[in-house]
Each structure stands twice: as structure tokens, then as C-alpha cells.
């Protein structure tokens, strides 16, 4: 078999399909995979994949050693090759990470809300141009705001009082309905817009958000580990939240309104996220327009027309959560709990870390260390560990561990994004070699490793 010819053809295809990386950059990222294939030509595909994941596994271990991240699950799906790496602990009690852990995916929930909205628009439940207050009169202070403004994240809001400080659900919702528009036309990433969309969708359909997620996403895709309300028997599988033992997420606004809203509250496994990505790519849950809006820059050059997505950018990881090595149509969704999913034209990958499952004592120590460094540079201190009480048949305390400064994205998520992009290319090359060897090869290749 002429491996060099296959390699050069693969490099040409990557360029032809569109990437911001040069041919030499793609070559550098995949040359090692070519050598692995050549040296191990009598090995099984699974054995070759085992060798290919070393750089990613080394990166994971390095990050875990240097930042307060108990455990992780990383998934990469390319063609018929599926890789899952998991390890560390599910929580501060040193319970081992299972291969089917449920992660608090935080703001990745916004993508589910957008997917449902796009389907409702397609079905005629409402239009992009419809005014919010006409669809849901409870939002009487938003003036001429349209659903398109909200779905593209082109608006800023203000409420009377902070939602997360309300102790009862009806009080929190009453605060939400006082929303006023403070700016419109410029990109503004916030939680409030998707909280509004959730309420509007429930109003126009007479269905709960949980029912809508099930109808348009989980049932369609056969997802078995995606929840808004976690079954009691699966609470022990939840990670990535300071409130995991209570079966709640690491988001005070979501907890204030009952545990979830359109901006946060979904928990999911890596396998279910891969299935979600497949459902997007094959058109099962998102039509061609929705996919284009997710991957096409909108108001900002690194954010999609579907406003919660990150799109590819010529400067790559410096400007987006899409590496230059990925396809130009790749897009990413992210959560503050240090969770991420990338969806490309023929690949899906996940990064699921769980720093918010560190103990409260460790979180307070991390906060103190961070503030010591900030004081030396003349910066004001940050409050990253907070407590909230909500009335749920008696006051219940929930915690917030804001891990964004404790586990900075540039040192955790971004290096893994790059490694996932490299592994995606490597597995793409392996797929081409396998097809050259056996054009009818259609076996699913699964490599799941506990590190």
C-alpha cells in the first residue's frame, strides 16, 4: 500500500474542504500518525488508535496535575472511529470517574434551547420577526424586542433585583419578567436571553421546557443519559457541580427558578453529547439553515448567527474555541463548568472537566491563592465561592464554585481543544488508509480507555 500517496491525497482533501491551517501545518499535525500506521501496518485499527491518543492523554494528565480538576471525560468521533478517555475522580470524595458520568454542562444548555427554537420557527409556532411581548405578555417591558434579536444575542437586559437572590421560584420568575432592554444591536453574551426564550417557548406551545427537550432532542436521538431532572438512581453519577450530591447544577439562577432554565440545567454524558452532535450533522434535530447559522459568523466574527456558538476564525484558538486545524465549518459550544463540544462536517468531540466538584475547602483555598496573586498586581479580589438559599419545602443551601479563574480556559480547555483537533485529523487519516485497504469496511471502531 502506498501510504505516502494516501497521505498527500488526505492533505489535499483537508485543504479542499476548507481550513484556516496551511497544508504544512496539517502535515506537521498528522505526520506522526503516518509513521505510526507505517510501523504498525499489521496492527488492528484499535491498536493503532491506542498509539495515536498518547499526545492527548499526556495533555490531560499534565492539566490535571497543575489545576484543581478531579476528573474528566474526553470524546472524539470521526467517521466510524469512536474514542473515549476518562479518568480521575468524579468528586472530592475520591470516587473514581465512571465511563458514563453525567456532567453539568452549564451554558451548553443554551444550544438545546436554540435547537428547539429553530424547530418551532420551522413549524410556524412563531417567527424570527415576532415581538417577544406579543408572544408572551409577561415580558411587558422589552419594548419592540424580537425573537431574532434574542436568538442572535444582540441584546442586553436588566431586571429588578438579582434572580439568584430570590428564595422562591415565583419570586425569581417575577424578577425575570421585569426584564428591560438596555442595549440592542451589539453582541452581548448573557444568560437572560435564553431564560426568556424558554419562557416564550413554553407559552406558545403549552408544553414545559422538559417536554420540549424530550420531544425535539432526547427522544428523537434516543438519548439515555441527558436530563433536566436527574433520576434518584443516577444522582451518584453527577459531576461538575458543587451541588452534585443534591442532584442540582452549579448555577444559582437555574436553581432559583427550579433547577433549570433555557440557559443552564442540562446534565449529560459524553456519549450522549456525541449522539447530539451526530443528530445535528445528519439533520435529525437541526435543519440545514440551523446548521449554517451555528457555524457561520454573525454579529461577532468568532460567534455564530445562532448567537451562543463559537465559529472558526483565521486566528484559531486565540480568537475562538475552534482550532485552526479544524474545518472552517466547525463550531463549538461551551459551559463555564469547563465543558465543551465541537461539531465539524464529519467529526464531533467533547471536553468534560469537573473542577466545580472540588471540595468547598479546596475552592476557598484556590480563591485565596488567586486573590493573593491579584493583590500583588494591584487587582481587586474576586468572590468565587458563594452560597445561596432557596425555599424548596424548606430552605436548602446551594453553592457556586466559579471555576473560570481557578481553572483558566487558556490553560485547560484550549490545549485540549487543540489536541482534539489534532486527533480528529489523525483519525481522519486512519479512516482513509482503512478505506484504501478495504473499500467496503464499515465496522465501528470503539476505543474506550480509563487513564
Image: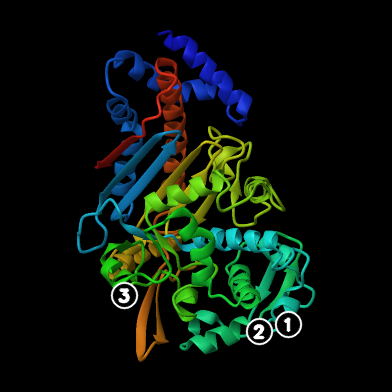
Residues at circles 1 and 3 in contact by the CB criterion of under 8 Å: no
Which quarter of the rendering shows the N terminus? top left
Mark 1 or mark 2, earlier in chain = 1
Q: Which mark is residue 216?
A: none
Residue 379 visible, this orientation = no
Q: Is residue 201 left or right of residue 415?
A: right
The residue tagged 1 is 141
Q: Compared to 42, does 119 lie above or below?
A: below
Residues at circles 1 and 2 in contact by the CB criterion of under 8 Å: yes
Q: Is residue 363 left or right of residue 19?
A: left
**Circle 1 residues within 10 Å: few <14, some 14–19, many ≥20:** some
Q: CA distance from mark 1 to mark 2?
A: 7 Å
Q: Which mark is residue 178?
A: 2
Q: CA distance from mark 1 to mark 3?
A: 35 Å
Q: Compared to 352, does 20 lie above or below?
A: above
Badge 2 element: loop
Q: Position of residue 425 (x, y in %)?
A: 47, 29
Badge 3 element: helix
Residue drawn at point x = 49 percent, y = 56 percent: 220
The residue sitting at the top extreme is 2
Mark 2 or mark 3, earlier in chain = 2
Which quarter of the rendering shows the C terminus? top left
The residue tagged 3 is 246
Residue 217 visible, this orientation = yes
Residue 433 sits in quarter: top left
Q: Position of residue 356 (x, y in %)?
A: 36, 63
**Circle 2 residues within 10 Å: few <14, some 14–19, many ≥20:** some
Q: Is residue 448 or residue 415 the one in the foreground?
A: 448
Q: Position of residue 160 (x, y in %)?
A: 63, 85
The residue sitting at the bottom extreme is 394
Amino acid at each position: 500500500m502506498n501510504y505516502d500517496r494516501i497521505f498527500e491525497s488526505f492533505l489535499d482533501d483537508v485543504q479542499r474542504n476548507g481550513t484556516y491551517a496551511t497544508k504544512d501545518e496539517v502535515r506537521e499535525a498528522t505526520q506522526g500518525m503516518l509513521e505510526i500506521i507505517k510501523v504498525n501496518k499489521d496492527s488492528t485499527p484499535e491498536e493503532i488508535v491506542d498509539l495515536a491518543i498518547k499526545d492527548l492523554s499526556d495533555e490531560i494528565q499534565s492539566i490535571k496535575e497543575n489545576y484543581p480538576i478531579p476528573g474528566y471525560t474526553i470524546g472524539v468521533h470521526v467517521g466510524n472511529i469512536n474514542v473515549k478517555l476518562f479518568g480521575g475522580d468524579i468528586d472530592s470524595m475520591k470516587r473514581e470517574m465512571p465511563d458514563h458520568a453525567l456532567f453539568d454542562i452549564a451554558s451548553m444548555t443554551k444550544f438545546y434551547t436554540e435547537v428547539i427554537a429553530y424547530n418551532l420557527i420551522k413549524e410556524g409556532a412563531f417567527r424570527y420577526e415576532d415581538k417577544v411581548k406579543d408572544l408572551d405578555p409577561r415580558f411587558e417591558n422589552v419594548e419592540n424586542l424580537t425573537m431574532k434579536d434574542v436568538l442572535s444575542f444582540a441584546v442586553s437586559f436588566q431586571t429588578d433585583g438579582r434572580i439568584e437572590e430570590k428564595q422562591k421560584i415565583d419570586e425569581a420568575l417575577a424578577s425575570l419578567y421585569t426584564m428591560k432592554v438596555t442595549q440592542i444591536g451589539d453582541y452581548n453574551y448573557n444568560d437572560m436571553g435564553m431564560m426568556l426564550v424558554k419562557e416564550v417557548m413554553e407559552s406558545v406551545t403549552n408544553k414545559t421546557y422538559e417536554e420540549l427537550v424530550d420531544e425535539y432532542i432526547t427522544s428523537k436521538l434516543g438519548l439515555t443519559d441527558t436530563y433536566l431532572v436527574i433520576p434518584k438512581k443516577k444522582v451518584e453519577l453527577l459531576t461538575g457541580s458543587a451541588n452534585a450530591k443534591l442532584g442540582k447544577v452549579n448555577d444559582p439562577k437555574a436553581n432559583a427558578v427550579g433547577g433549570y432554565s433555557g440557559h443552564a440545567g442540562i446534565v449529560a454524558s459524553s456519549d450522549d453529547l456525541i449522539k447530539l452532535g451526530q443528530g445535528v450533522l445528519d439533520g435529525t434535530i437541526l435543519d440545514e439553515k440551523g446548521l449554517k447559522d451555528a457555524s457561520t459568523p454573525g454579529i461577532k466574527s468568532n460567534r455564530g448567527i445562532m448567537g451562543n456558538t463559537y465559529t472558526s476564525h483565521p486566528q484559531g484558538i486565540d480568537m475562538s474555541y475552534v482550532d485552526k486545524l479544524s474545518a472552517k465549518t466547525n463550531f463549538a459550544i461551551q459551559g463555564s463548568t469547563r465543558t465543551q463540544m465541537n461539531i465539524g462536517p464529519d467529526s464531533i468531540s467533547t471536553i468534560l472537566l469537573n473542577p466545580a466538584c472540588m471540595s468547598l475547602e479546596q475552592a476557598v483555598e484556590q480563591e485565596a491563592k488567586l486573590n493573593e496573586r491579584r493583590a500583588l498586581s494591584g487587582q481587586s479580589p474576586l468572590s468565587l465561592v458563594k452560597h445561596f438559599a432557596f425555599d424548596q419545602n424548606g430552605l436548602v443551601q446551594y453553592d457556586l464554585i466559579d471555576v473560570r479563574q481557578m481553572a483558566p480556559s487558556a490553560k485547560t480547555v484550549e490545549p485540549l481543544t487543540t489536541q482534539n483537533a489534532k486527533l480528529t485529523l489523525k483519525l481522519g487519516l486512519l479512516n482513509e488508509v482503512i478505506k484504501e485497504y478495504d473499500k467496503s469496511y464499515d465496522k465501528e471502531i470503539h476505543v474506550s480507555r480509563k487513564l
